[in-house]
Image: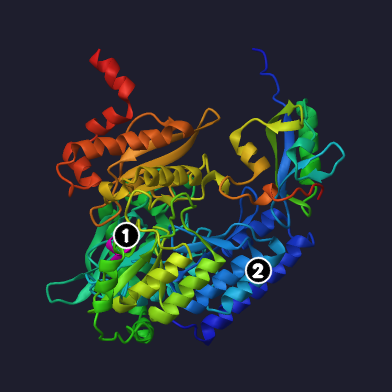
Amino acid sequence: MYKYNEFDENFVRERVAQFRGQVERRIDGSLTEDEFKPLRLMNGLYLQLHAYMLRVAIPYGTLNAAQMRQLAYLAERWDKGYGHFTTRQNIQYNWPKLKDVPDMLDALADVGMHAIQTSGNTIRNVTADHFAGAAADEIEDPRPVAELLRQWSTDHPEFQFLPRKFKIAVTGSSTDRAVTKAHDIGLRMVRNDAGEPGFEVIVGGGLGRTPMIGKVIRAFLPKADLLPYCEAIVSVYNLLGRRDNKYKARIKITVAENGLEKIRDLVEGRFNELRREFNGFDQELLENIEAQFAPPVFRKAPTLAFDAYRAANPAFRSWSDTNLADHHADGYAIVSVSIKKHGATPGDASADQMRVLADLAETYGHDEIRISHEQNVILPHVHKSDLAAVYEGLRDADLATANIGLVSDIIACPGMDYCALATARSIPIAQEIATRFDELKLEHEIGPLKIKISGCINACGHHHVGHIGILGLDRAGVENYQITLGGDGTETATVGERAGPGFSADEIVPAIERLIDAYLGIRASGDETFLQTYRRLGLAPFKAALYPEKEAANAA
Amino acid sequence: MSRRPFTPKVVTANELIDGDAVWLTALDSWSRDMAEAELIDDEAIAQDRLLFALSQPDVIVGAYLADAKASGNGAAPVHFREEFRARGPSNYLHGKQVGVKNHV
């Protein structure tokens, strides 16, 4: 894992000291809110409905045990004993007091973390595949490149006042777990004909008000050209992107309005200028970073204990069926820890749970933890012979819910329970859906299904790429929930299709139930997933299930 | 064309240090309990009270006028967003739902 060098340490400490002075001046009245707001946003501090919110970056979703323990400490010392993991691999604290935030940032700096550029019109936290460094289908660990991008983008003087926020995601694997096609820049590692690793560069994806699937601007970019190429994209956007209209300011609109060809020509031109200025220093830096991401020494050991425990314990068997993924090392598994207990708030972990996760990672997981954009926690390197102990540790901390990828593994943004931008609540809808399907004992029968809920058009809950997406709106002063179907956030990314008129808060859970009942009735076999059935049959049968009155009226 | 009738308003904001939702009372203080808010029936007075709120940047942040109505218990929200601000989040008994501490 990357360890801060003296430069990083000094930079982060200096920013905390600056912010401490800014907070003091705000509190003593020498700064107005208008003057202070851009300063607090640069440091990840928002003001929400009931309190301030501090958004802390978890670069490319990677943490070690000491960092996780420090997140627990922050939650307990300065918040209400929990933190909320977000869809951009950040953690949010919902209740900090303004005067305490500089101390929180200092405590983060103690473990090499910060909240810089988690807000504002800058390059945000670079996200990555949460199975990075562990996935069986990976070309290379994408995190060294993500760290290089983090260093390049942090306080980059040219990119502190972009037309709008800018998000980069990177994956080293052909299976896209990082939603790269819904990012301003998506980087997918691929090999060229000579077998060398490089990147397919995707540009102009994004969700929000105008959802768009990113377009390939460069089919193969050699790894060594990554920084100048990304810098070329962002600098072209910085000049061309619209500043007259906030809703047209993202690069997806720049690409749509100018056309991919024009953007590509401008980017390639700028790239040719820039690559001369990158004289190899970035590659030295990358080599140094790569050395710090050397894989752990995987042990060779029998896995008989795993098989025996699995045979003897049905609950463990169920959990291992849903919550484990293939690891590239023999005898190892990737453990996804569900932060989606039925009826609980998606993505919320208590300080005690964070400490248990830290302990388990340290004892059984080579000191590595990942946060997924799906708001779960990953222990990427666990030897199968240790899975029983890990499971028991998780179970004792109420963290052994066996539902990864199932109907109750719901992404939900904070919605109007916290967020000042929200138009409706998301969390209670997620809680009710999960509780309902747990009561029905149907979720394993239903199989893989991604429900994603956003409490406003900005789509932090990724509803456009949910197999079932739910968007909460304000319709004439009442919460109203619109359903989209057939969305997909993977390498076959698709924006979901709107099913029809929205539902009230009371009607939305029964509507989802009708939808899933319909799927169970029309799927070709038990192996055909919801998304596959949708792709085979289209919207019609689902629409009929959602709006039975309309169907009856048409038949009459 | 007749003017639309004025919907009664309250002045609301967030407290500077802890960010909690607060309402301006008739006594010029800020309350964390919406029921104690001054319910304003007149547009000119509402604007005047908002200016008074905006002149206190060292106490509160982001003051605005929100629609409200009278209830047996004092001022009450009209829109659900204001209802949530007055009550706190629905997933935990946090914020205003933990004990009641009134004046700032």
Rendered location of residue A341, percent (x, y) = 44, 55
C-alpha distance separating marks 1 and 2: 36 Å
Q: Amino acid at mark 1?
A: Thr
Judge whether residue A123 can be spotted in this image. no
Look at mark 2 in the image and give the residue it sits on: A77
Query: Measured along the vertical axis of the image, is residue A464 above or below residue A548?
Result: below
Rendered location of residue A301, percent (x, y) = 26, 85
Residue in view at x 52 percent, y 72 percent: A355
The magenta region covers: A318-324
Rendered location of residue A524, percent (x, y) = 14, 42
Query: Measured along the vertical axis of the image, is residue A400 above or below residue B95?
Result: below
Residue in view at x 71 percent, y 70 percent: A21
Chain under callout 2: A
Residue in view at x 31 percent, y 20 percent: A550
Residue placed most toward the observer, A165 or A327: A327
Quadrant of the frame with the C terminus of chain A: top left
Helix, strand or loop at label 2? It is helix
Quadrant of the frame with the N terminus of chain A: bottom left
Q: Residues within 10 Å of mark 1 (few under 14, many from 20)?
A: many
Rendered location of residue A162, percent (x, y) = 48, 59
| Number of the label disc, if any, that sits on residue A180 | 1
